[in-house]
Amino acid sequence: MRRISKYCFSLLLCFLSVVPTYSQEEQDIEKPRVRGLRFGVDLSRFTLYYFEPERTAYEFSVDFETVRNLYPVVEFGLQDIQMEKPIYTYQSEGYYFRFGIDYNFQKKQSIDQYEMVFAGFRYSFSKLSHSADNILIIDDYWGDYYAPAVPENTSYAHWFEITSGIRAELFRNFFIGWSFRVRILLAQTKDHVMEPYYIPGFGRGNKRAGIGFNYSIYYRIPLIKTIPKVRQEN
């Protein structure tokens, strides 16, 4: 845990060290700054089938530029697991929310450009229910036998994330980008019978920390257009 904390601290220092020290140049006053809800779909979730066919997951996001370069973010995801092994069957389903802020360090650009090199944080919450049956106990002495099924149980998890990445505007209001995440588990409901195989939005149920990667497409609904005021020369 101490090693993870040192890594997160080093990651923050790395991002802070690249913050530009120059001031924002004056922009063309005839160009408006467009703001609106930007909706995203995580494409990396659709590739899970090739690596973990037993797990199905979807993730969506929405952000909004409240002030220049500052983006509050909400992310929502769903997960379903149907795992059939020779000695047991496992089922799980759940959802998760993430709430946080992204800050854009890409400052030296025109008022009508929206590329991002960002870092941010998330507070995350997850709920899942899981169960298991057809549990075969291998016993060379007494012989193999089936254990009672594990009934459905509900558990919760809370964690903190540090994230960084880039976003580029392919064409007007359409974006594509990726992000890298470091996750630290804060609290988890203890299940003394069976721990979760995979916590939705976090990772393996037996881990206290993890990493993640997202590759997403976005569409922004243009809602507000503002033209910056001309700075008065003294």
Image (spheres, helix red, strand yellow):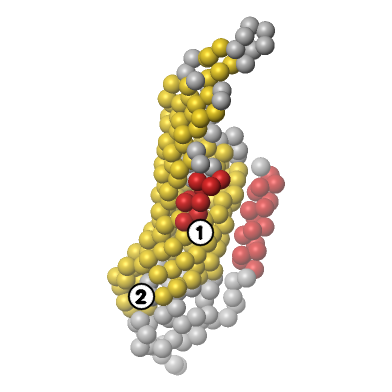
Instruction: Please identify the quarter of the rendering in which residue 11 is found.
Output: bottom right
Identify the element where label 1 is drawn: strand
Pointer 2: residues within 10 angstroms few (<14), some, or many (20+)?
Answer: some
Q: Amino acid at mark 1?
A: Tyr
Of 12 and 117, which appears nearest the observer?
117
Question: How many neighbours does mark 1 have within 10 angstroms: few (below 14), some (14-19), or many (20 or more)?
Answer: some
Q: Nearer the viewer, residue 198 or 24?
A: 198
Q: CA distance from mark 1 to mark 2?
A: 24 Å
When the figure is inspected, residue 208 is found, relative to residue 219, above or below; the finding is above
Q: Residue at x 56, y 23 (%)?
A: 87
Q: Residue at x 67, y 7 (%)?
A: 141
The nearer-to-camera label among 1 and 2 is 1
SS for dot 2? strand
Question: In the rendered image, is residue 176 in sight?
Answer: yes
Image: 75 above or below 185? below
Q: Position of residue 55 (x, y in %)?
A: 49, 40
Whole-percent x, y for residue 50 in the image: 53, 47
Instruction: Name the residue at 47% across, 66% down.
Output: 176
Q: Quadrant of the N terminus?
A: top right
| Residue 30 spot, x, y in % from top left | 35, 88
Name the residue beneath numbered marker 1.
215
Of the 4 image quadrants, the one containing the C terminus is bottom left
* Residue that mark 2 sits on: 34
Tell me if I can see residue 66 in this picture: no
Image x and y of residue 95, in percent: 41, 41
* Residue depicted at x 40% and y 70%: 174
Mark 1 or 2 closer to N-term?
2
In the image, residue 25 sits, relative to residue 91, either above or below, namely below
The answer to whether residue 139 is above or below residue 34 is above
